[in-house]
């Protein structure tokens, strides 16, 4: 069985991935909470990426897959964004990712070929108002992932998923009413908001040997928003 580590896998997309993997892999979820994991076949490690150092002694020596889920959504006009917001988004999206990969590098390189999956945003690829902070951080994630994929090929594959707004706890305030949900759905060519399972399916593919010839890519799972213009 593969050993898969999910950082931030107690809610949303990470939880959806863990649910799919729990019976076919040994899943280790490192997160702040575990209330939704109690009845699942996973091992939980208490971990806050913004303050803690990952305890690798609780993990197997060989890690076949790593999924880094922590993220942020701070959507405000640039003129009202303080530097602290940019720094906070950078810490959770970029520095947290780097810190985790550095801690797990011996475990990941111990596998014949390992796979890292991390997350960007549709806003890193197309200009969207009020997204300067998250776009800056997620754009850095994409550049980092490509460079890391090049440096560790063929031993380690690194890919990025760039969703649009997805129905997770992180996005709850943007989908808190039927009106908001419908407005968001209509902005997407496929006329609905994404759900965690939509994104999880791409992550599962990228963790699997079926994607063994894919690395350094950014996959847009965004209801067509990044490439389709149909709202004319």
Image (cartoon, rainbow, N blue to C red):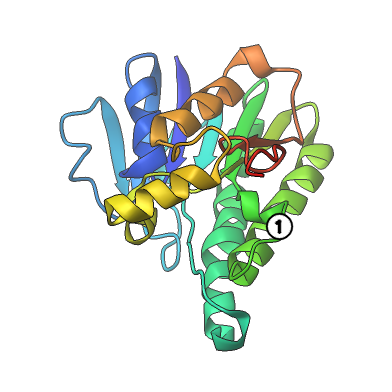
64 relative position to 215: left or right: left
214 up-or-down from 80: above or below: above
Please state the horizontal and vertical placement of residue 143, each as a whole percent of the image: 77, 52
Which is more toward the observer, 54 or 34? 34
Q: Let me know if residue 62 appears in the view.
A: no
Number of numbered discs visible in the structure rendering:
1
225 up-or-down from 135: above or below: above
Quadrant of image for the N terminus: top left
Which of the 4 image quarters holds residue 39? Answer: top left
Please state the horizontal and vertical placement of residue 232, each as a whole percent of the image: 67, 44
Q: Dot 1: what SS? A: helix
x 55%, y 27%: residue: 202
Residue reaching furthest to the front: 232
Which of the 4 image quarters holds residue 224? Answer: top right
x 60%, y 48%: residue: 101
Alpha-carbon neighbours of circle 1 within 10 Å: few (<14), some, or many (≥20)?
some
Which is more toward the observer, 82 or 190? 190
122 relative position to 154: left or right: left
Please state the horizontal and vertical placement of residue 132, each as a whole percent of the image: 64, 70
Q: Let me know if residue 156 appears in the view.
A: yes
x 49%, y 24%: residue: 201
Which of the 4 image quarters holds residue 98? Answer: bottom right
Please state the horizontal and vertical placement of residue 205, each as a whole percent of the image: 57, 20
x 64%, y 55%: residue: 123
225 relative position to 68: left or right: right
177 relative position to 187: left or right: left
**Mark 1 = which residue?**
139
200 up-or-down from 98: above or below: above
Which is more toward the observer, 131 or 45? 131
């Amino acid at each position: 069985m593969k050993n898969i580590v999910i950082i931030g896998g107690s809610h949303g997309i990470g939880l959806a991935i863990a649910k799919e993997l729990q019976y076919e892999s040994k899943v280790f979820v490192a997160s702040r909470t575990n209330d939704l994991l109690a009845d699942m076949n996973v091992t939980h490690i208490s971990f806050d990426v913004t303050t803690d150092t990952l305890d690798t002694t609780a993990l197997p020596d060989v890690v076949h897959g790593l999924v880094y889920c922590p993220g942020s959504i701070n959507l405000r006009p640039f003129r009202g964004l303080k530097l602290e917001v940019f720094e906070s988004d950078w810490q959770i999206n970029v520095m947290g990712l780097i810190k985790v990969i550095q801690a797990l590098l011996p475990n990941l390189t111990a596998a014949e070929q390992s796979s890292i999956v991390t997350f960007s945003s549709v806003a890193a690829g197309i200009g969207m108002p009020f997204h300067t902070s998250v776009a800056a951080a997620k754009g850095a994630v994409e550049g980092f992932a490509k460079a890391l994929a090049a440096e560790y090929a063929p031993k380690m594959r690194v890919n990025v998923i760039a969703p649009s707004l997805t129905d997770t706890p992180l996005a709850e305030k943007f989908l808190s009413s039927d009106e908001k949900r419908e407005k968001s759905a209509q902005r997407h060519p496929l006329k609905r908001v994404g759900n965690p399972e939509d994104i999880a399916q791409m992550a599962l593919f990228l963790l699997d040997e079926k994607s063994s010839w894919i690395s350094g890519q950014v996959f847009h799972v965004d209801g067509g928003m990044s490439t389709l213009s149909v709202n004319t």
